[in-house]
Every structure is written in C-alpha cells, then in structure tokens.
Amino acid sequence: MIRLGVTGTDTGVGKTMVAAALLALLRQRGMRVAGMKPVETGVAPGDPASDAALLRAAAGGYDLPEDVCPLTLPEPLAPWVAARRAGTDVDIDALDAAFERLCEGRDAIVVEGAGGLLVPLARDLAFDSLFRRWRLGLIVVAGNRLGVLNHALLTVRAARAAGLDVQGIVLNSLPPGEAGTVEQTNGDALAEIFQDLPVLPFPCLPGPHDINVLAEAAESAGLDALIHAARKSLRTDRNL
Ligand SMILES: [Mg+2]
C-alpha cells in the first residue's frame, strides 16, 4: 500500500491542494484511496470549506468525516496549543485507530499535516513523529517565494534526521501576480540543490476544485514521479 504524508515549508503554501491533486491522480490511475487530515485547527466540525472536506471529496467521498479528520479545533493555532486552549489534548491512539480504518481495503492513503513538519501535536510530539509512526513517505510542498530554499533545506534535513523517506518536493505557485526573478529561479535552484529528488513545479489553481481539474494539474505537473518514488520505496521496504 502506498502511504504518503504531505508537509509544507510553512503554513498556507498549498499542502491541501497538492494532497487533493495527488488523491485525484491516484484514483485516475485506478487505485482505491483515502485522504486524511489528522488534526485541523481554525474550523468547526463538518465545515464544508475545511481541508478535510476537500481531501475526503478528492478521495471519492466514501469515508466517515470523523475518520478523515478525528480532531477539529476552533482556534487557528498549532494543534498542541489549540487543543490546550480548548481544554483537551491530541489523542494519538484515536488518530492511530482512524488511520487504520482508512487504510482498510485501500491501495493508497495521503495524509496532510498541519503547517510545517515540526508543528507540535503535543509538547514533545510533532508531525515528523506521526508520519514516521505511520511509515509515510514524505512529500514536501514548498511555497514559491523568497525564503523557500532555506525552508526546503531545513524541512528535508529535519525529515531525514527523523528517519523519514523524502520522496519529492512540489514547488507550489502562490497567488497573486506575475512571477518575478525569485519565483523564476527557485525551481532550478531547488532542482540543483536536491539532485536526488524530483522537484515539481505546480500551478496555482483557482477554486472551486473539480476532481478532473485536480487530476489534470497533477498529471501535467508530473506528480506521477511521486507515485513511482513511493512504489520504489515500498519495494525497498519489503527487501529489508
Ligand atoms: Mg491545508
């Protein structure tokens, strides 16, 4: 089974769109898929504009919303802080159970984190640990703006230090406006830095998000390379 985790170089860089596009592409390739957003903050349960709702729809809309996103928290804060302020905490066992249910009978799962890789779920637990626990290959969504070289290097270095298998970088175009020199040079610079990884520029997609539009964008951006990388690391895993 293909297991992918999607993190970002920062919050608001397009993780959800890339995760949804990956789900749409996997489905188009004939796979049974599930999407998951383990914790979402700044939304009410069942919010149709939530990340979880988009991921669930991109995966076909079969899964229980409470499995796709077991914990929603009203304040737009890191999960640990939002949970504490809501008088609760992030229940890892509950997340594990939902993850297992979503994996049942599926060929692939795509899990979207919240913010960046080291965003805390608890004081001493961040998304790097959760992704490692679930044996997810990591996709890094990088926002195409000034600072992305540093943020991508930090993210990949932290991921590898945590024992995660990084499978590629998606360089997401951010609105608004015309691409300047920074946006025009980031792709080549990242490709040169990360010679061992696919670096895939992805377009800025206006909403609402039709599943066919997502799949087409994913195909044109070459996200198949990430599926191949995930398959390859599965084979390596089995050989261990
Ligand atoms: Mg998101």
Image: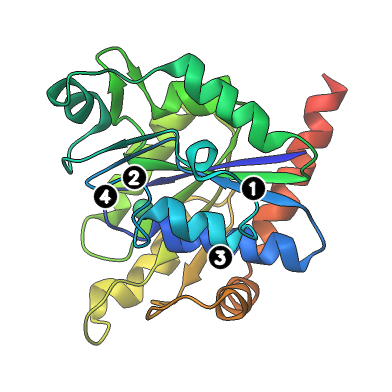
Q: Quick one: 40 or 191, which is closer to the camera? A: 40
Label 1: how many residues lie within 10 Å, few (<14), some (14-19) or many (20+)? Answer: many
Left or right: where 142 falls relative to 5? left
- Residue picked out by circle 2: 45
Name the quadrant containing residue 214: bottom right
Which badge, 1 or 3, is on the more N-terminal residue? Answer: 3
Disc marking residue 11: 4
Q: Nearer the viewer, mark 4 or mark 2?
A: 2
Q: Residue furthest bottom?
A: 178
Which badge, 4 or 2, is on the more N-terminal residue? Answer: 4
Tell me if I can see residue 199 in this picture.
no
Residue 169, percent across and down? 49, 54
Q: Nearer the viewer, mark 1 or mark 3?
A: 1
Q: Nearer the viewer, mark 2 or mark 3?
A: 2
Judging from the image, what secondary structure is the residue with disc 3 in?
helix
Disc marking residue 34: 1
Q: Quick one: 92 or 135, which is closer to the camera? A: 92
Judging from the image, what secondary structure is the residue with disc 4 in?
loop
Residue 239, percent across and down? 87, 24
Label 4: how many residues lie within 10 Å, few (<14), some (14-19) or many (20+)? Answer: some
Cα separation between marks 3 and 4: 18 Å
Judging from the image, what secondary structure is the residue with disc 1 in?
strand
Cα separation between marks 2 and 1: 19 Å
- Residue picked out by circle 3: 21
